[in-house]
Image (tube, helix red, strand yellow):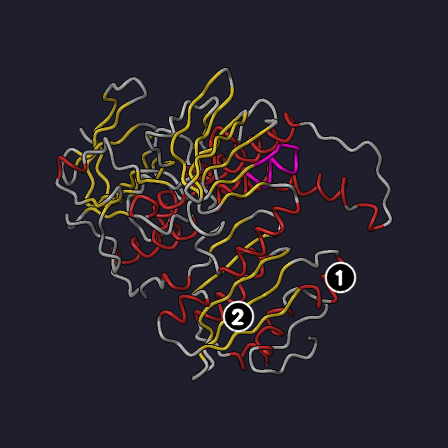
Amino acid sequence: MKKTFEIAVLGGGPGGYVAAIRAAQLGFKTVVIDKENLGGICLNWGCIPTKALLKSAEYFDIVKNHSSEFGIEVQNVSFDFKKIIKRSRDISDRITKNVEMLIKKNKVERIRGFGKLVSKNKIEIYDNEGKLIEEIMSDKIIIATGARPKTFPFIPIDKKNIITSKEAMTLEEVPKELIVIGAGAIGVEFAYFYSVLGSKVTIIEMLENILPIEDKEVSETLEKSFKKRGINILTKTKVVRVEVKNSYVNVFVEKDGKQIELKADKVLSAIGVTGNIEGFGLEELGIETDRGHIKVDKSNYQTNISNIYAIGDVIGAPWLAHVAYAEAIHCVETIKGLHVEPIDYNSIPGCTYCNPQVASVGLTESKAEELGYDIRIGKFPFMASGKAFATGDRDGFVKLIFDAKYGELLGAHIIGHDATELISEVTIAKNLEATYESIVKTVHAHPTLSESIMEASANAYGESIHI
């Protein structure tokens, strides 16, 4: 007799396991199906283990290059690359085990295997050898199969010389020379990590700036910081082809109408992701997809088949774990019949964990102008912050964008130490439709970096005290 469930979740990443837990909390008989460890790319190969790597690089950089500024003299500083990698993998293992415990605690059934939809209510589950091991029935199905690195024919990934972010996390040694193709968050984080550990790094980006979706002023500031570190940056540069020759990788690019040949030990392809939509039975069921992702109604995350839903990276941008979390909870609560406010995708924070960190929410300056807003801009440099001076974190700034007519916060852009922590304050402010005045009148603790948000708000209206 087949097992029956009220909700079956296909995929156990950030969207999938959160959907399963919330469904169980709401009283649904729930199962989550995934052939790998729970946590998806985020916990196994992305968000968490990469931050462990980046923290190791940050500590090494501080001790080697900045400890004497704090009156601490350290000689013969070195690092053990294998230990850095092992720490990252150990943290990933521990976090994924914690998720398995949460699934068990919430009485969600866990099936390890590859799930395939064979009807709108039936899922077949296969083992790694392709053998059918189980069949289940479910009233509702939530697809949360995530995404993977995008590939192109002219960049032939061999996982040895030409690698993706997954292989970049477990290299045997630090490459002497590394070329990073793509300057989004993944590309710049690995560029920072390996440059700190001694790699000669070159970043190639087809668009005008690194981190091209960020505010241009922020991107230009990060570019200056990276160049100061010795990272070579080629923007407005097109990759023509990549090939391996004699254990080296040759990258042929076109810039300003000229052909250039570059060479490195390793090439990291970091040019985006595409949804995992193949092999799950979507085409056979007639579930609509578009350019590598599943089409859904974002008011409830239904596909064109009424009892089948999809959330997270598999439904397209923004490809962020916290978006998958939010979509998971929204989807399940909607299925339950609760009143749920739609997710405001204009108020989703984005974070990049290089050094200096970058974080943003809402409109950039150029986008606000494009949409016809009359804007006021407030900036506050960390150089003017007493806390930043005391801690040695003086690089960067806070930039806030307000609607001049009503004073409403439209966007926030931060580059500097702990930018990824500071962004939550302005995300809350934006969600609450805060004005410059409400931010300025909120008393901020002193000394803190968060005071810079208050000062930037005041600066937009000529009221800043400390600049």
Membership of 194 in magenta stretch:
yes
Say whether residue 453 is left or right of residue 165. Answer: right
Mark 1: secondary structure: helix
Residues packed near mark 1 inside 10 Å, few (<14), some (14 to 19) or many (20 plus)? few
Q: Earlier in the sequence, mark 2 or mark 1?
A: 1
Q: Which of the two residues, 337 or 277, is positioned nearer the viewer here?
A: 277
Q: Which residue is mark 2?
A: 400
Which numbered tag is attached to residue 334?
A: none
Mark 2: secondary structure: strand
- Residue type at tag 2: Leu
Residue 63 image point, x, y percent: 76, 41
Q: Which residue appears farthest toward the top when viewing the image?
A: 246
- Residue type at tag 1: Phe
* Residue 373 location, quadrant: bottom left
Looking at the rendered image, the quarter that the N terminus falls into is top left
Q: At x 17% / y 48%, what residue is drawn?
A: 307
Range of residues picked out in magenta = 191-201
Membership of 21 in magenta stretch:
no
Residue 252 image point, x, y percent: 43, 31
Q: Is residue 16 above or below residue 344?
A: above
* Residue 256 location, quadrant: top left
Q: Are dots 2 and 1 in contact, CB under 8 Å?
A: no
Q: Which residue is mark 1?
A: 389
Residue 437 image point, x, y percent: 54, 82
Q: Is residue 104 visible?
A: no
Q: Which residue appears farthest toward the front when viewing the image?
A: 258
Q: Is residue 25 visible?
A: yes
Q: Which of the two residues, 259 or 386, is positioned nearer the viewer here?
A: 259
Q: Is residue 420 above or below residue 188?
A: below
Spatial CA distance of label 2 from label 1 is 22 Å
